[in-house]
Image (tube, coloured by chain):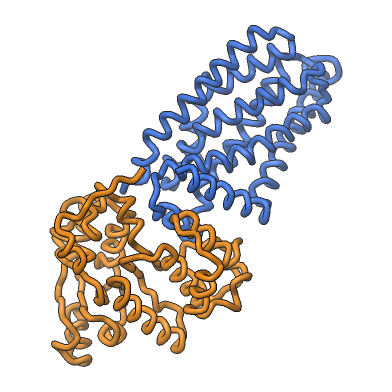
Amino acid sequence: MSSQTAPADPERHALTVLEVRGLSKRFGPRNALDSIDISAGRGEILAFLGPNGAGKTTLLKVVATLLAPSSGSVAVEGHDVVEDAEEVRRRIGCAFHDVMLYENLTVEENLRFFGRLYGAPPSGERLDALLAALGLQHRRTDRVSTLSRGMKQRTALARAMLNGPRLLLLDEPFTGLDEVAGEALKSFLRDFAASSGPVLLTTHDPRLAYELASRLVVLVRGRIAREVRPEGTSIDGFAQEYRRLLGG
Amino acid sequence: MLREALTIAAKDLLVEVRTKERLAALVLFSLVVVLSFRFSFELFGVHDGGLAQSHFLVPAVLWVTVVFSATLGMLTVFSKEEENRCIEGLLLAPASRNALYVGKLVSSFASFVVIALLTMLFLGAFLPYDYRGQYLPVVGLLVLGTFAYTALGVTAAAVSASSRMREVLLPVIMIPIALFTVIVPSIAATSDVLLENLSGALDEVRFVAFSSVLFVGVSLLVFDYLWEA
């Protein structure tokens, strides 16, 4: 069913995985996203910050093909999210605030189900490795309904990794994680970015974003209010500027 | 597409078997409706050998109960996917969204056909009614009619899924469309079978089969667009 669209410039696309140009998304009269331009390549972790309703989740959902852009273009490895949505979905992994897991299925049943659905049924070995990497081996036969929020979040991340994505989209991935799990996740994301492709994540925590990301993007009312690299500012300087942009 | 569809159907059936939530509620609903008819008939003295034995009335009671139960079941087809926004997990599959339609059609049909057969059993036991020995043809009609109604219902459920008024909207969309394409022809076919008018029944069967093909065809054409936001 899917059509293969070859990237126009393969060399350039090998470096740039995500390209967003003039993206706007309107819900009725309200502009959730307004003329967003951004690109991301392998090795990068982009942290999107901003107040509630700034458009962070909407941006991730447009890239994930769950929402259609009102105008502008979004491409993942040269595949347009509207024209070639199936190819885009083949290349991305998503873990949003809602964990997208069936409460009445076990961790393993959920992962096997989504793996088959995403065209990448996990072998026993792959499943073991994934569960081990996210510290879930001891809960693999437990129903999701019995897991804590943090465990569900980790299972959602395992689901997002099933198809070997080239771009990872994470909506507030640190919510509900304790300090140890949070540190493990940071390390996991750094490894992913270095070996597989860029990570786009949203957070409300400027210090966490500063520590983890290679680029910090502040969204306010659907627009990019500030985009900085951590090396160009201090953590306190950024936190202060972030509060100012939020009007605090 | 078929692989993804069967994966979704298998998951739905596993969850259904494990929780038995929907099936138990629908069986109970069907039983309550059948018993309501049974005591209504008795109230007016039309129970034994009277109106309740009519080969016109029984098919109507049977199909109205099946349609009401299936409509109730349709409400949960996509609303259950709202838990943890699992629907987004399904929509992220790198496949045509028609896989979702076919998967939901298979799993819903499997559940509703069980309800339809149990409804037939309840009517037989509580009215009581012997279907004049035409059990297999009536079962065949129930399978066909339930499939046609489900084929329409899955798309109607998807249309109404995002509405806050879906409990009202779904039957308002479904029943008028199904009335002359599935429900009335199925009642007529069942009545013809009970009266051993097989040529008449065959005409109605062809009509319901055509409706099934039409509903599946149209659904496959429009289903992708239903999820565009």
Residue B45: image quadrant is top right
Residue at the location (67% across, 21% down)?
B60
* One can see residue B89 in this view: yes
Residue B144 percent location from the top left of the image: 61, 26
Which chain, by letter, is orange?
Answer: A
Q: Nearer the viewer, residue B158 or A123?
A: A123
* A37 relative to B181 in the view: left or right: left
User: Does residue A200 show up?
Assistant: no
**On-image quarter of the N terminus of chain B:** top left
Q: Is residue B58 above or below residue A235?
A: above
Residue A239 drawn at (x, y percent): 22, 87
Q: Residue at x 60, y 30 (%)?
A: B146
Drawn side of residue B71 relative to residue A225, left or right: right
Q: Nearer the viewer, residue A99 or B216?
A: B216
Left or right: A175 as drawn, with respect to A228: right
Query: A182 or B1, which is in the foreground?
Result: B1
Q: x%, y% of residue A242?
A: 20, 82
- Residue A21 position, x and y percent, is 14, 59
Task: Give the mark count.
Answer: 0
Q: Quadrant of residue B99?
A: top left
Residue sitting farthest toward the right: B48
Q: Residue at x 57, y 66 (%)?
A: A108
B134 left or right, relative to A237: right
What colour is chain B? Answer: blue
Which residue is found at the position 22% from the left and 64% from the top? A18
